[in-house]
Image (cartoon, rainbow, N blue to C red):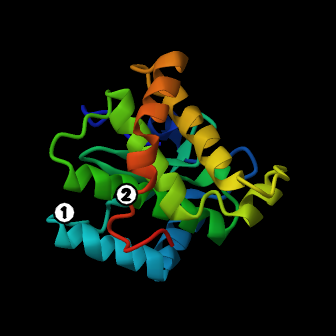
Amino acid sequence: MAGDADSRPRSGAGNFSSSAQGGGMTVEECQNMIQRSLRNPMVKFLKEHLEKSGCSIGSNFIKAVNCEEATAGGYVAGGGIVVCSNHLQIQDEVTQVVIHELIHAYDDCRAANLDWTNCAHHACSEIRAGHLSGDCHYKRELLRGFLKIRGHEQDCIRRRVMKSLAANPYCSEAAAKDAMEAVWDVCYNDTKPFDRAP
């Protein structure tokens, strides 16, 4: 999920409270896991490339919150990353959210004209985040109950892009699908800042 051009989150990331709900963890537990995730090699790599691209990340760039809507986290243009503590339970989930959202932050940093209200721009960043973050690794898909072996990664990315775009008030379902298909090849094959998809 990514944020609007006017720095407001698209969905649940903006509606938060102070106590754990929905079987997740507390904000404090999540904040500790965020700190541990900063030692992950992929997180370090993405943070380094954000800095190299001219976008500094302060100590409060990634923060834990409790979200009212069912979302794992989000990137807010100009505001940073929120990780929804009450919808996550383990370190791996927190690290995955941080990686996914850092890819959105990288896209926002490197593209001066990225417009989160534009369905194609939003779709492109979601395609890249889904492809490069490992969100759609076959083991994660099996744990979600999706048993398809061949072609699972692209199906998973498409499903997750559509879910994220559904939260964008500027994208109807038809516009979201058309935008995703229009940018798919270019965005799926854009692996920056990686040399190839991890």
- Mark 2 is on which residue type? Asp
The Cα–Cα distance between marks 2 and 1, rounded to whole angstroms, is 20 Å
Q: Residue at x 82, y 52 (%)?
A: 148
- Mark 1 is on which residue type? Cys
Q: Residue at x 76, y 66 (%)?
A: 139
**Counting other residues with Cα less than 10 Å from the Cα at mark 1, is it few (<14), some (14-19), or many (20 or more)?**
some
- Residue 194 or residue 77, whichever sits in front: 194
For mark 2, give the secondary structure. loop
Determine whether 152 is above or below 161 in the image.
below
**Counting other residues with Cα less than 10 Å from the Cα at mark 2, is it few (<14), some (14-19), or many (20 or more)?**
some
Task: Judge left or right: residue 78 versus residue 2.
Answer: left
Task: Judge left or right: residue 27 versus residue 193.
Answer: right
Determine whether 63 is above or below 178 in the image.
below
Determine whether 36 is above or below 102 in the image.
below
Residue annotated with mark 2? 190
- Residue 119 or residue 166, whichever sits in front: 119
Residue annotated with mark 1? 55
Query: Where is residue 77 drawn, in percent x and y?
Result: 28, 44
Say which quarter of the image contains residue 163: top right
Query: Where is residue 79 drawn, in percent x and y?
Result: 28, 48
Q: Residue at x 52, y 63 (%)?
A: 133
- Residue 145 or residue 1, whichever sits in front: 145
Query: Where is residue 197 drawn, in percent x and y?
Result: 48, 68
Residue 104 at least partly seen:
yes
Name the mark nearer the viewer: 2 or 1.
Answer: 2
